[in-house]
Image (tube, rainbow, N blue to C red):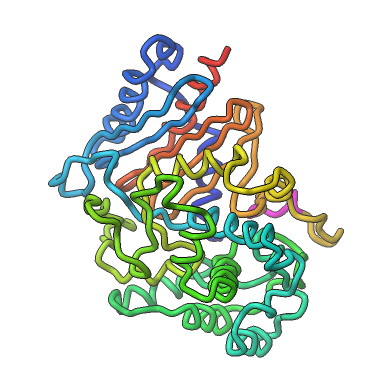
Amino acid sequence: MRISSSLLFFLFLLTACQNVRVTDGAKNIDTTLQALVQEAVDDSLGEVPGVSMSVIAPRQDIHWSGAAGFADKNEKTVLSPKHPSRIASITKTFVAAAIFRLYEMDSLRLDHPIVRYISQEHRDLLAADGYQVEQITLRHCLFHTSGLYDYAVASPAYLEAVSENPKRRWSRTDQLRFATEFGDPLWAPGGGFRYSDTGYILLGEVIESLVDSTLAYGLRQLLDFDSRGLTHTWMESLEPAPFGVLPQVRRYYGRLDFTEWDNSIDLWGGGGLVATTEDVASFVQALFTGQVFEQPTTLALFLEGPPAFPVSYLAAEDSQFMDYRSGHYSFDLYDKPVLSHSGFWGTYYVFLPELEATIVVNYTANAKQRLLKKTALLLYERSQ
């Protein structure tokens, strides 16, 4: 059984331990946060070239970013918190938020069938593979309950295909066709949970169809990148990088350097954004504190979990089940609810509702996950 990076991240949060004494951080928070980042690099014994982190906790007067180590395995470039990186599936949080902005604008309904907004070619591909296309709603795709086969990680076939031709430009249609050729419907819409990039590339198409432009334009306009100061965030290859940004942190999978591979392998809504940890933290903080949506009721709806599953689906017995909301996970950390998402290449965020605080961490490679939990513990300790 293949385990998703998001599931591995969740398991880490339940098992991480500590070395740096977080209780020492009450007096000099900047020094302690930098020590935690440095520890994440040092304790990896060379497996983690570099780590960057941003923390926003207004109640504790914290707005901090820092880094340690290098932006590449060759240790040629010292890592800075200003280095952007591909954030992969954290893009889903942005996509989900954009869908809810369109909902606020009365441009769509969450329970509309997704076929209202996608091309005839894509409708036909899904129908030919046996999908109940008129029953798959936007809400199903948001919650990963659509039954859509995940082209990206459901089997090794996609990685093998992209490895054979790293410079190939993949379209959304290519990926949807891949999903229908290598897998079949998992269940009727709403019948269970299975993480699926396929659903989110279709949500990306919904955004494009309703803004009559690219996904890059849709996210930037619907989520007000410019007014939010997201000056180091962009959809790679769909829009130019902002002027003056540093080169990206290199991205690795095992021994492979994916940085020069065409980014279309993860672009059309399941991934695609490049950002710094500070930009991600700024957006996440704004999102979960009610600054992105116009109405508080929209945020409340955004935070809701999926409708009840049929009795035939036993979530407690499904090792891949997680409490996935719209573009984010919900689980308990230190017996307190947190909201979170991870990205395949090594970017993670956690929002702590009780503290209204956000932590974002990015690893150059080989994430050794203790830093997020220890930083959360530090913030909880300081709040006492």
Residue 367 percent coordinates (x, y):
37, 43
Residue placed at 34% from the left, 50% from the top?
A: 232
Q: Considering depth in this image, is 13 or 339 the residue closer to the camera?
A: 339
Asked if residue 48 lies left or right of residue 123, the reply is: left
Query: Which quadrant would residue 30 be assigned to in this image?
Result: top left
Going 59% across and 49% down the picture, which residue do you hit? Answer: 328
Q: Can residue 81 be seen in this view?
A: yes
Measured as percent of width and height from the top left, residue 48 is found at 29, 41
| Location of residue 192 with respect to 162 vertically, above or below | above
221 with respect to 239 (left or right): right
Question: Picture coordinates of residue 257 (x, y %)?
Answer: 26, 60
Quadrant of residue 54 within the rendered picture:
top left
Q: How many labels does the image show?
A: 0
Left or right: residue 371 versus residue 166 is right
Q: Which of 282 and 338 is in front in this view?
A: 282
Where residue 353 sits: x, y (%)? Answer: 62, 32
Quadrant holding the C terminus: top right
- 104 vs 165: above or below: above
Q: Which residue lies furthest to the left in this view?
A: 76
Most distant residue in the right direction: 311
Q: Quadrant of residue 114?
A: bottom right
Rendered residue at 77%/66% (across/down):
111
Q: Which residue is drawn at 45% across and 48% down?
A: 227
* Image quarter in which the N terminus is found: bottom right
Q: Look at the image and say whether residue 81 sits in the magenta stretch.
A: no
For the residue pair 115 and 290, the one nearer the viewer reads as: 290
Residue range corresponding to the magenta coloring: 315-320
The answer, for residue 150, to whether it is visible in the render is no
